[in-house]
C-alpha cells in the first residue's frame, strides 16, 4: 500500500507539471507593473483558482462514478465516452442527477474562489522577478514537463499482482490522455477470457489448421491448385458506402447507377459486414485480415510496423504496392502505418497544383484522386511490374462538396450528393481505365470502409454494418452473386484466391468463394465486440460481460447463454487482441 501511495504521489506530481504550465505562462507574460493589481488578483486568485477547483472536483466525482461502474481509473472507455457524446451524455443524465451535481460543484468552486481571493494578501511583500528570470523559470518548467512526457508511462504503476493497488497508484488525468494517445483498452482486464491454449486450438480448427501443424499461432500454408495469375489489383475503399444506398439493396433514389451497373457485371458480395465504425477499422480489416479489438484500430497503435498484410504477400510476389489517399495521410496515422508495412504513399501533398481541380478540408475530389491512380498504374505498367493500389476516397464525407455540373444534386446539400458524386467518379474512372493497356489484366475491387449510419450508435445493430463489395474484371471474372455471410477481414484471402496465390498465411479471414465459408462476421464499436452468424449475435462488453441474441426475422431477440458459441467468439477476439504483435508479424518465406 505504501508503494502504491508513493507511486500515486509521483504520478500526481507528473500531472501537476502540466497543470502548472498555463499559470506559469500567465505570470511570465504578465507585465511587471500589472503583478499584484486588482485585475491580476481577480484573474489568478479568484477566477483561475475557482476554475482549477471546479476541474479537480468535477474530475474527482467523474472518476468516482467511473470506478463505480468499471472498477478502474479512466481508460479508453472514457475516451470512447468523449466520442459518443450524445448517447453517453443522455445515458448519464438518465442515471445521475447531473444538473444538481454540476450546480453543487460550481457553488463550491466559486465559494472557494471568493474565499481565496478575499483571504489572499492584497500587497506583495516582494516585487516579482525580472522578466528574464521568469522566462528562465518558464523554460525550466517546460523542459521538465517535456522530459516527463517522454519518460513517464502508465505501466510504471503496475507495481503489484493486485489490480486494485495498481489502479490506486495511477492518476486519472494521466490515464485518460495516455489512453487517447495509445488507443488501447486492455482486453484481459475488461473482457471475458478463457483458457489461452484451448482458445488457440479452437481458432486453429476454425481456420482449418491441422492439430499437428508445426508452426505457431495461425500460420498455415494456403495452396492453389492452379498456376498463379498475377493480375493487377486496384482496391477502392469507398468512404461511408452503406449497402442501402444501392438499388441492388432496395434504394429507389438512383444514387448509385454506376455501382449498380458494375454489380451486375461483377462478383457481387451481398452479405458482407464492416468490422467497425471508422475508416481506420475498415483499413486494418481489409489490409491485415484481422478482427477488430477494443480501443482503436491497429492503424493508430504503436508497434504496428512489419505486419502480415495483403501488401506484404503481393510485394513478395513482385508487385508494386501503393496507398493512395485524397487527403493528408498523416490524419489517423494512415501514411505512417502503410509506409511501415511496405506500401508506397501518395496523398494530397504529392499532387501538383495542376492535378487538383477541386478540394475541401478532407481532400481532393475523387475524380482528381482517380486521375492520379491512372498515372501511377501507367508508371508501374511501363516498368512491367504488376501493381496493387489501395485507394481511400474522401468525397462522400461531410461537408459533401464536389465539383459542379457533375451530378443532378447540388454540392453541399447532404450525404446523398456525396454518395452520388462518388458513384459518378468511380464510373468515370472505370471508363477511363478501359482505354489503358493494363485494364484487361486488372481486378477492380470496390468496398466500403464502413457505413454512413454506424458511427455514434452505442449498441451493435448488424444492419448498421452492412456494406457492399464487388470485384469487377470483365475479361477475367464471370459475374456472380455471393450471398455468403462474411466480413471485411475475408476480402484479402478472397482476392488472393482469385489470383491463385500460394502463400504462408497469417490472416484470420477466409476465402468467401469456398463453399461453406465463412458464414460469420465481426462487428464492433470502440467497446463492444460482436460475433454474427446466420441466426445469432454474441456481444462482448466491459466489464467481463457477454450477451446473446437469436435472430427472428429481421430482429435480434435476447436469448440464453451459448457456451460453445461464446468460446468461438473468444477464440477470435482474445487471440487477436493479445497476439497481434506476435502472430501477425510478417516473416519472409
Image (cartoon, helix red, strand yellow):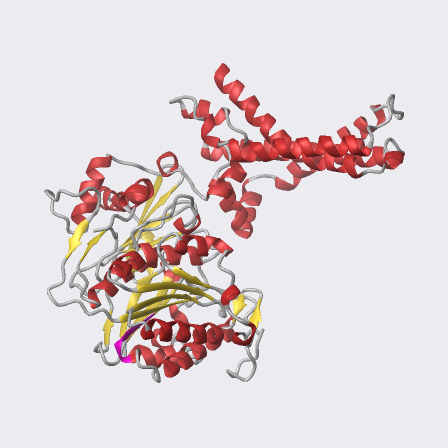
Coordinates of residue 331 in the picture (x, y in percent): 51, 56
Q: Tell me the magenta residue range.
A: 440-445
Lateral position of residue 436 relative to residue 225, left or right: right
Q: Quadrant of residue 540?
A: top left
* Magenta run includes residue 443: yes
Q: Position of residue 497 (x, y in %)?
A: 20, 64
Q: Residue at x 42, y 63 (%)?
A: 451
Taking depth in this image into account, of 416 and 330 the one nearest to the observer is 330
The picture places residue 388, in percent across and down from the top left corner, at 32, 66
Tell me, yes or no, whether the highlighted magenta stretch contains residue 466.
Answer: no
Position of 511 relative to 477 (above/below): above
With respect to residue 469, does 490 lie above or below? above
Taking 139 as reference, is 46 left or right?
right
User: Residue at position x 50%, y 24% from top?
Assistant: 169
Q: How many marks?
A: 0
Q: Main secondary structure of the magenta part?
A: strand
Q: Quadrant of residue 478?
A: bottom left
- Answer with the quarter of the image where residue 311 lies: bottom left
Is residue 271 toward the left or the right of residue 201 in the image?
A: right
Q: Residue at x 49, y 69 (%)?
A: 396
| Residue 144 in view here | yes
Q: Decide: is 335 above or below 399.
A: above
* Left or right of 179 on screen, residue 411: right
Q: Nearer the viewer, residue 245 or 308?
A: 308
> In the image, residue 284 lies at what x, y percent?
37, 55
Which residue is at the far front? 383
**Which of 451 and 564 lies nearest the eye of the viewer?**
451
Query: Can residue 77 be seen at all in this image of the molecule?
Result: no
Amino acid at each position: 500500500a505504501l508503494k502504491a501511495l508513493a507511486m500515486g504521489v509521483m504520478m500526481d506530481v507528473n500531472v501537476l507539471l502540466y497543470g502548472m504550465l498555463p499559470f506559469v505562462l500567465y505570470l511570465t507574460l504578465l507585465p511587471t507593473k500589472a503583478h499584484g493589481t486588482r485585475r491580476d488578483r481577480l484573474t489568478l486568485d479568484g477566477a483561475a483558482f475557482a476554475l482549477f477547483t471546479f476541474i479537480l472536483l468535477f474530475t474527482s466525482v467523474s472518476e468516482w462514478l467511473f470506478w463505480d461502474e468499471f472498477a478502474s481509473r479512466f481508460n479508453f472507455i472514457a475516451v470512447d465516452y468523449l466520442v459518443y457524446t450524445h448517447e453517453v451524455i443522455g445515458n448519464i443524465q438518465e442515471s445521475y442527477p447531473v444538473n444538481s451535481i454540476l450546480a453543487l460543484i460550481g457553488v463550491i468552486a466559486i465559494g472557494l474562489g471568493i474565499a481565496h481571493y478575499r483571504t489572499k494578501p492584497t500587497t506583495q511583500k516582494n516585487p516579482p522577478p525580472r522578466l528574464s528570470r521568469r522566462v528562465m523559470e518558464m523554460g525550466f518548467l517546460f523542459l521538465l514537463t517535456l522530459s516527463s512526457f517522454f519518460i513517464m508511462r502508465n505501466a510504471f504503476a503496475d507495481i503489484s499482482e493486485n489490480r486494485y493497488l495498481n489502479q490506486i497508484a495511477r492518476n486519472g488525468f494521466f490515464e485518460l490522455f495516455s489512453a487517447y494517445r495509445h488507443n488501447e483498452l486492455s482486453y484481459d482486464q475488461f473482457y471475458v477470457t478463457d483458457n489461452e491454449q484451448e482458445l488457440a486450438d479452437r481458432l486453429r480448427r476454425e481456420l482449418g489448421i491441422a492439430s499437428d501443424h508445426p508452426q505457431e499461432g495461425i500460420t498455415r500454408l494456403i495452396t492453389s491448385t492452379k498456376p498463379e495469375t498475377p493480375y493487377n489489383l486496384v482496391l477502392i475503399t469507398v468512404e461511408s458506402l452503406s449497402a442501402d444506398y444501392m438499388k441492388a439493396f432496395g434504394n429507389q433514389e438512383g444514387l448509385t447507377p454506376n455501382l449498380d451497373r458494375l454489380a451486375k457485371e461483377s462478383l457481387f458480395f451481398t452479405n458482407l459486414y464492416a468490422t467497425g465504425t471508422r475508416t481506420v477499422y475498415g483499413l486494418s480489416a481489409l489490409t491485415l485480415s484481422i478482427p477488430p479489438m477494443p480501443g482503436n484500430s491497429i492503424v493508430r497503435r504503436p508497434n504496428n510496423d512489419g505486419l502480415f498484410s495483403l501488401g506484404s504477400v503481393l510485394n513478395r510476389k513482385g508487385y508494386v504496392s501503393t496507398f493512395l489517399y485524397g487527403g493528408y495521410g498523416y490524419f489517423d496515422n494512415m501514411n505512417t502505418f502503410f509506409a511501415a508495412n511496405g506500401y508506397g504513399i501518395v496523398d494530397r501533398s504529392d499532387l501538383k497544383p495542376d492535378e487538383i481541380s477541386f478540394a475541401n478540408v478532407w481532400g481532393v475530389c475523387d475524380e482528381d484522386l482517380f486521375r492520379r491512380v491512372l498515372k501511377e498504374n501507367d508508371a508501374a505498367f511501363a516498368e512491367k511490374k504488376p501493381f496493387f493500389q489501395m485507394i481511400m476516397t474522401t468525397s462522400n464525407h461531410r461537408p459533401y462538396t464536389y465539383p459542379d455540373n457533375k451530378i443532378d444534386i447540388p454540392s453541399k446539400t447532404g450525404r446523398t450528393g456525396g454518395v452520388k458524386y462518388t458513384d459518378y467518379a468511380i464510373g468515370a474512372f472505370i471508363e477511363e481505365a478501359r482505354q489503358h493497356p493494363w485494364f484487361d489484366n486488372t481486378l477492380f475491387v470496390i468496398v466500403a470502409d464502413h457505413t454512413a449510419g454506424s458511427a455514434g450508435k452505442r449498441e451493435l445493430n448488424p444492419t448498421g454494418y452492412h456494406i457492399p463489395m464487388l470485384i469487377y474484371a470483365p475479361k477475367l471474372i464471370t459475374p456472380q452473386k455471393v450471398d455468403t455471410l462474411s466480413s471485411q477481414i475475408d476480402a484479402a484471402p478472397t482476392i488472393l484466391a482469385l489470383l491463385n496465390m500460394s502463400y504462408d498465411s497469417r490472416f484470420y479471414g477466409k476465402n468467401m468463394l469456398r463453399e461453406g465459408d465463412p458464414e460469420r462476421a465481426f462487428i464492433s464499436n470502440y467497446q463492444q465486440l460482436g460475433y454474427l452468424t446466420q441466426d445469432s449475435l454474441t456481444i462482448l462488453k466491459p466489464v467481463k460481460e457477454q450477451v446473446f441474441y437469436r435472430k427472428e426475422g429481421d430482429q435480434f431477440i435476447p436469448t440464453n447463454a451459448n457456451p460453445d458459441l461464446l468460446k468461438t467468439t473468444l477464440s477470435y477476439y482474445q487471440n487477436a487482441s493479445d497476439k497481434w504483435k506476435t502472430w501477425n508479424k510478417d516473416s519472409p518465406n
